[in-house]
Each structure stands twice: as structure tokens, then as C-alpha cells.
Amino acid sequence: MSTISKKFVLKHTFKNVSSVIEKKSVFSEEEEHFNVPWRIYIARKDGSLSFYLNCPKSFKIGNWSVKTQIQLRIVSGYSRFLSAENTFGNTNPQKLFTSYGWAEFMNWETMTAECIINDTLEVEAHVLIEKMTGFYEENLIHFNDQELSDVMMLIGETKFYLSKQFLAAQSSYFKSLFMEKHKKTSKLGLPFIDSDDFQKLLELFHGHPVINENNVEGIVLLAKLIDSPLAKQQCEKFLVEKSKKSLKKKMQMAEKYKLKKLASFCEESLNVPVENVPVMQPKLDNVESDIPNNAQTG
């Protein structure tokens, strides 16, 4: 599966559940993940608990889509969960989705008896992003010169013709892959990598200033997976010096991707009396620390 580590968890505790008004939605706080806004909401409707994941990104800002696997969970009391696949966005005029979930997640009275503790309901949304479109800029370089390459890498459905030596110089993962494990390999598939993130990472390796708000999290995720100090440093520099992301989001990214300078920057910012500094530490998502060992040779 592509983008196996492009995932996140939304967590929220709904309070005063007994006071929820019929057919009126109650929303969690909005969070940003991979430069896309997300939130959870519940409603009481016709004797059932309705439970949805919402992506409030505007349809007016170009054509975009986010293909996901989602799992909505009740974690208080007797836990319950339901799973599904859904593509959010506006690329398909027949399926314009901003929310996905279940109108009848479970019976309201059953939920009240089995899942409510002190009039609160704890829920989670686990989201795995499989593919994103409409977020990245046009390609600056086309890696299609077969004569100057010694390996063809298949990332998703995209072929990249590259130099093993060049890649090995940028990443300890690629150094191990090409100098030790697959010295004679001329074709290699990495199904866990997103092709758009890989394209921008390669452009960064070639000296182009491609990092922006849209792609920085995808690039730093990939840089962490393949152990690329240069890419990681460039992403961290952007987050400290240029990014307009919230302090809460920067704190999350510093912890998730082990960005020490960004963590120090956030800590210093917390000591400055700024109106929009979050009062509480954010709940951080769990992430896999090891790169999947499923490179496919050809």
C-alpha cells in the first residue's frame, strides 16, 4: 500500500452529551494534518448516534482529492468502531464529499448506557491517507532520462529514472539499499512512498527551493523514513523561519518527526506572551519509527 505512514489520529471528548439537541451537529476542534483541515462531529438523530469525519477544505480552492481509509471509534466505556474507505474532495462532480461516516453508528440509548462516563463521550478518528491530488505544484524536473540512469524506481504508478550513487549520497537508507542489498538491481519498487512527495524530495536534492506549506509535512515524513539529513534540515528551517502553521501544529511536527531545532523554537515561543499560543500541550499521534522492509525488485 502506498503512503503507509501518512496517517494521523483525531481525539476528542464530547461533554454534556445528555444535552445534545436532536439533529444538531456538535463538532470537535479543527486540526491540520498534511496541510488539510479535519474534525469530528456527532449528532443525535431519530434515536441513533450519528458519527462523522469532516474535511472542511473549500471546494472553491481548485480541484483536490484525498483518498483515505478511516476508522471511527468510541473509546469510552464499551468501545465500538466502524471502518470504511472514502475520497474527500471535488474532483468527481458526482461525489462531492466533505464528510463521511454513519448516520446510525449505534443506538443512542445503548450508547448512553454503555459508552457514556460522567456525561462525556470519548471518540477517535484514525485516518490513513492513500493518495492526495491537487495540492502540489507542477514538476520542475522530469526524471525520465534512461541513458543517464542506472536504476528505474517505480513509486506508485510513476517511473523515476535515477542514479544510485546520487541517491546513496543523500540518504543512508538508499546507501544501504543500493550499495549493499541491491547492488545489481536495475529496477526497484517502493510501494510505501507517495510519488508526489518523492518528486518534490528529488527536486529538493537537486537544489530547488520547493518546500512550502502544502508539501513540507509530506517531505519531512519521507526524509525521516529514508534518513535524509539534508531534506530534514531544509524542512525544519522552513518551519522555523517561514511557515505560518500554528504553534500547536509545529509542536506536533517537532515531536512526530524528531525536529530538535523546531522543538526549541516552540519552547521559546511558549515563553513569549502571544495571544494565540495554546494553553495546553497537544495530544500527539503515535507514528511508526521504522521504514517498511518491502522494497520490490524487478
Image: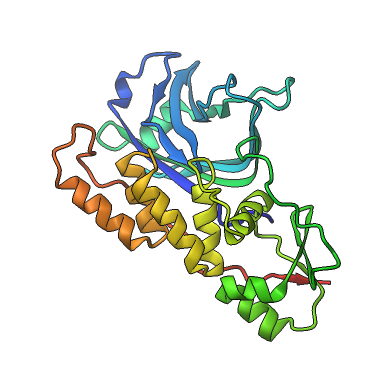
Report how many numbered discs are placed on residues in the image: 0
The image quadrant that residue 261 belongs to is bottom left
At horizontal 42% and vertical 13% (from top left) the residue drawn is 22
Looking at the image, the residue that sits furthest to the front is: 207
At horizontal 36% and vertical 55% (from top left) the residue drawn is 254
Q: Quadrant of the C terminus?
A: bottom right
Image: 68 above or below 204: above
Q: Quadrant of the N terminus?
A: bottom right
At horizontal 44% and vertical 27% (from top left) the residue drawn is 41
Looking at the image, the residue that sits furthest to the bottom is: 180
Image: 37 above or below 166: above
**Whole-percent x and y of residue 277?**
22, 38
**Whole-percent x and y of residue 213?**
48, 41
**Whole-percent x and y of residue 185?**
80, 78
The image quadrant that residue 235 belongs to is bottom left
- Let me know if residue 74 appears in the view: yes
Image: 69 above or below 235: above
**Would you say 266 lies left or right of 93 here?**
left
Tell me the colour scheme of the image: rainbow
| Nearer to us in this view, 199 or 208 | 208
- Let me know if residue 7 appears in the view: no
At horizontal 71% and vertical 51% (from top left) the residue drawn is 141
